[in-house]
Image: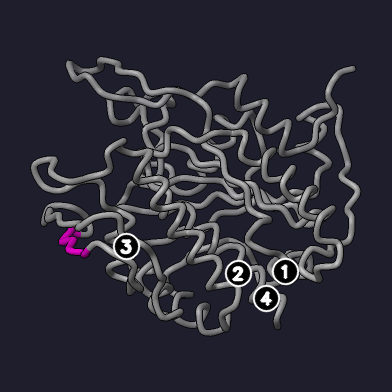
Amino acid sequence: MRTFWKIFLVSFISFFIAFFLGSYTYVRESKHRMNSKIVKVEDEDKDKDDEKSHRPLKRVKRYTSLAEAFEKSDRVNIAILGMEESRSDTIMVASFSPSTKEVDVIFIPRDTYIHRRGYDGAEQRKINSIYAEHGVAGVKKAISHVLGKAPIHHSVIVDYEGVIKIIDSIGGVEIMVPFDMRYSDPTSRPPLDIDIKKGKQTLDGKNSLDFLRYRRGNGNNIGYADGDLGRIRAQQQFLASFVGKIFSYRLPIVIKNSFNYVKTDITLREALSYGKDAVGMKKDNFSFFTLPGEAEFRRYEGKLLSYYVHNPEEVQKILSDIYAIKKPL
């Protein structure tokens, strides 16, 4: 049964990434993955006698086009949705390669512009509105569209309560809080009542969720100096601490205390199959990207709204890297 827990660990880490890195992760350097690969190679050269650095070399199969890769690659793409009532507040895709044990995570901002025929309302042109009318199948189709027709094989849906339960099940997460965080909003779903003191501490589930949702105080008082970028860095630090702890924790406890808060179409047979290949994964097997694009203001129905407009050419470059497409000579 160990392999069963391993594959669910992959799913849970993926869903935490979705919630923790937020809905507005518009800016993320896509060079991270390439740099991390370089670091891995250098570490292997320097630490050959270190047991932790010993890994069997994998031959990466390369493809001539994305269309060929989408058809023949062993990669499994999982859509992860963090729900806020009927809207998918957080959307991401975790692409797992059984042959290389790599997980490449692409975050899709909830305000990503996508127009559906017959849905002409200003808010209906955002990808996070699709779930209400078309369910998870509709969201998977939209994700495939913005990712250049990449196949989306599975889905995982989670809620805020699941975040709290899972973090409590591992005894909390240690993090350095950069400043006093105080914010209250009873109209938020779920309601926000954040009160976290500055300093290094172990946050329980409720305070962890508050830390990850915090942007700035009431009246725009006290927040990250560089806005969302500061918040993203804080979330990444939290995630690194969380991943480091969960990889050394008793996974059955995590699963038992959080299974009811996750909905997935991954069957037990599929989980066991994927899990066999996931054994041996480490936190540095994960790489993160944000859907390439930029924010734009557009006016619909007399309203000026901010949308995130993706860049198909840049999306193709990221996917070509992930799927190991041969570069022309």
The answer to whether residue 88 is visible is no
Residue closer to the observer: 288 or 268? 288
| Location of mark 3 (residue) | 209
Residue 275 is tagged as 1
Magenta-colored segment: predominant secondary structure:
strand
Q: Nearer the viewer, mark 4 or mark 3?
A: 3
How far across and down, in percent of the image, does residue 153 sit?
65, 50
Left or right? Give the position of 299 relative to 18: left
Looking at the image, tell me whether mark 1 or mark 2 is earlier in sequence order: 2
> Bounds of the magenta span?
191-197
Q: Tell whether label 2 touches label 1 (CB within 8 Å).
A: yes
| Location of mark 4 (residue) | 4
The answer to whether residue 189 is visible is yes
Q: Tell whether label 2 touches label 4 (CB within 8 Å).
A: yes
Residue 8 is tagged as 2
User: Image point 78% across, 48% down: which residue?
Assistant: 42
Left or right? Give the position of 22 relative to 153: left
Q: Is residue 227 above or below residue 86?
A: above
Looking at the image, tell me whether mark 4 or mark 3 is earlier in sequence order: 4
Q: Tell whether label 3 touches label 2 (CB within 8 Å).
A: no
Q: Tell whether label 1 touches label 4 (CB within 8 Å).
A: yes
Q: Which element carries disc 2, helix, strand or loop?
A: helix
User: Image point 42% across, 30% down: which residue?
Assistant: 112
Q: Is residue 100 above or below residue 52?
A: above
What amino acid is found at the position of numbered circle 3 in the picture?
Leu
User: Image point 35% across, 42% down: which residue?
Assistant: 230
Screen quadrant of the C terminus: top right
Badge 4 density bin: few <14, some 14–19, many ≥20, Cα 10 Å: many
